[in-house]
Amino acid sequence: MGRTYIVEETIGQYLSNLNLQGKSFVSGLLIGQCSSQKDYVILATRTPPKEENNENLKHPKDKVDNLDEEWATEHANQVSRMLPGGLLVLGVFIITTLEMGNDFQNTLRRLVFAVEKSMNKKRLWNFTEEEVSDRVTLHICSSTKKILCRTYDIHDPKSSAKPADWKYQNGLSTSWLSLECTVHINIHIPLSTTSVSYPLEKNTKNGLARWAKQIENGVYLINGQVKAEDCDLLEGQKKPRGNAQASSCSFDVRVLTQLLLNSDHRSTATVQICSGSVNLKGAVKCRAYIHSNKPKVKDAVQAVKRDILNTVADRCEILFEDLLLNEISEKKDSEKEFHILPHRVFVPIPGSTVMLCDYKFGDESAEEIRDHFIEMLDHRIQIEDLEIAEEINTAFLSSSMNSEAPLDNRDDEQPKEPMQTSIALKIQQNMGMIAAFAVAVLAVGIAFHYFSD
């Protein structure tokens, strides 16, 4: 028996109202949450049309076989940044004017694998063996209204399609549970002379991978208590009386990370010759959501962990993208430079307790954030619904002439007059010395300390 997908009823209306605008097909993403028994789909969003140049317009590629995988996967990467903990891109949908044959199913299969592979490259975490590895493809024929729902095991490149049930339900996520926490981070990433030739993105991700293990192995207090993993998250919560619908319930989560190794582990100091280092400092607001159908503590904790890891990694990625877009000469006479990093902004899904997120630089307007939501998620939002989760934080750049840097080096000096800007500085390397940029990742401070050989 195949998997069952419980789908928010408004998604059916959204899909039926999608205008193909004279094209033979339109595709998009399905967003929701997996569970051991069934999967929940709470949002669908079409992939925005790609702007074509005049030459391409003369020879349009409007066949399903020519579906642009690269464009679709980039859309999935952008959307995945906007999902809080607990939510995933569960699969893809495609609406066509005609019913399609087996060749078309192969196209869908390639797409769902390409989307998952692209998103997996950016993650600091891995799926567990117990988790559901099926991803869904949904095909709707606009003329016959026929729906074909199938799943593929993304862990098995040779997996074949399996049938799945697609069932609509009204008010699916009106009573989902939220978990919120603030995590204070102080991550020091040394850049060794041997890794200086690597892109800064790669060095940073390698450093974040070490920090991610601390988050994975941390102790999580839910409303001040440590609960057994297999315990029901709602155990001890008051149930609504009569036929009253369960209201949204919020949990406060605290994260305790291990500071000392166990007594049977030996700790040694290490001195490493570095060309520089990266510091991430600050406090990040994290939020996760989980369905209210007998949720387990382990699923809630896992959703929080992944939101912590995702939001830090995503902000670093946004930082490097800004670096490519903004090429600004360095101020060689200045030892430190200060920059404001983007805020995390939340916005509600209409008719749901779940909120999605985005990242806002200081000079970006609320209208720009609204337009980005519309472009990526194809859903209109109200500016007054935007919730800025974090206060402005700063980061600083420090250049000095040290030949060696111990791994536990810290620089706790705080900037006195941070510059109100969100630009990134161009990285340059001359005569064995790196000079780079510093931009703060919203409530995360990123400091780059640079040394010569």
Image (spheres, rainbow, N blue to C red):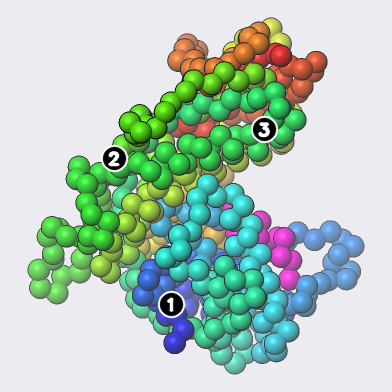
Quick check: 205 above or below 18?
above
Q: Say which residue appears at 52% left-offset and 86% top-offset.
A: 163
In the rendered image, is residue 383 in sight?
no
- The answer to whether 31 appears left or right of 333 in the picture is left
* Highlighted range, magenta: 67-78
The disc labelled 1 sits on which kind of residue? Tyr
Percent of width and height locating residue 29: 56, 67
Number of numbered discs present?
3
Mark 2 neighbour class, 10 Å CA radius: few under 14, some 14 to 19, many 20 or more: some
Taking the magenta stretch, the answer to whether it contains residue 308 is no
Local SS, label 3: helix
The disc labelled 3 sits on which kind of residue? Leu
Percent of width and height locating residue 340: 53, 26
Which quarter of the rendering shows the C terminus?
Answer: top right
Residue sitting farthest toward the bottom: 144
Comes first in the chain, label 1 or label 3: 1
Q: Quadrant of residue 27?
A: bottom right
In the rendered image, is residue 216 in sight?
yes
| Residue at mark 3 | 200
Percent of width and height locating residue 20: 66, 76
Comes first in the chain, label 2 or label 3: 3
| Residue at mark 1 | 5
Separation of marks 1 and 2 at Cα, in angstroms:
32 Å
| Residue at mark 2 | 254
Local SS, label 2: strand
